[in-house]
Image: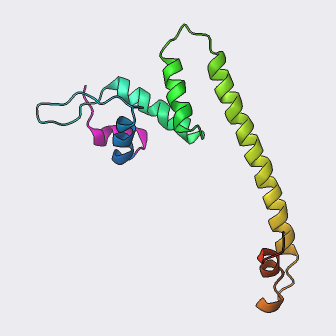
Amino acid sequence: MALTIGTLARATATSVETIRYYERIGLLPAPPRTRANYRAYGQAQLGRLSFIRRARDLGFSLDQVRTLLSLSDDADRDCAAIDRIATAHLEAVERKLADLTALRRELKAVIESCGGGTVGDCRIIEALGPGSD
């Protein structure tokens, strides 16, 4: 059963423009065309696009997704390379979480230091101003 690009887009919560972009950059192979020159997607493209979407939702870069797709094409291959990619991504996520935790602490401290009053006396504006680092 052939799927139109609109049906594929709805099935994967992906915009038509994004699907076309993935085709242009080679993440998603261009599908065959019907006699009316419509794209005719199949289950293979649906599965591949679902994989891409899930990987992107988890924050993997397009290059990482490309590598993961390439590695997944060989089911008998050792998965050590995939583990390395996932581990590196997890480490990046953990660094971001640490940065966000520090940012949260800093913002809470700045907000708690505000005692109200006028903008001229605002501790938040003062903390954001030059020389406050």
Q: Is residue 39 left or right of residue 118?
A: left
Q: Quadrant of residue 61?
A: top right
- Residue drawn at 29 percent across, 43 percent down: 6
Residue 37 image position (x, y, % from top left)? 15, 36
Residue furthest front in the image: 131
Screen quadrant of the N terminus: top left
- Residue drawn at 57 percent across, 9 percent down: 77
Relative height, residue 56 to residue 115 (above, below): above
Screen quadrant of the C terminus: bottom right
Relative height, residue 38 to residue 114 (above, below): above
Residue 24 image position (x, y, % from top left)? 35, 38
Relative height, residue 78 to residue 45 (above, below): above
Residue situated in front as seen by the camera: 112 or 132: 132
Q: Is residue 44 left or right of residue 99?
A: left
Q: Is residue 32 left or right of residue 15?
A: left
Residue furthest left in the image: 35
Relative height, residue 111 to residue 71 (above, below): below
- Residue drawn at 76 percent across, 54 percent down: 100
Magenta-drawn segment = 1-14
Q: Is residue 31 magenta?
A: no
Residue 120 image position (x, y, % from top left)? 79, 91
Residue 99 image position (x, y, % from top left)? 78, 52
Q: Quadrant of residue 42?
A: top left
What is the tally of numbered marks visible in this picture? 0
Task: Give the colouring mode of the picture.
Answer: rainbow
- Residue drawn at 53 percent across, 31 percent down: 65
Q: Is residue 6 magenta?
A: yes
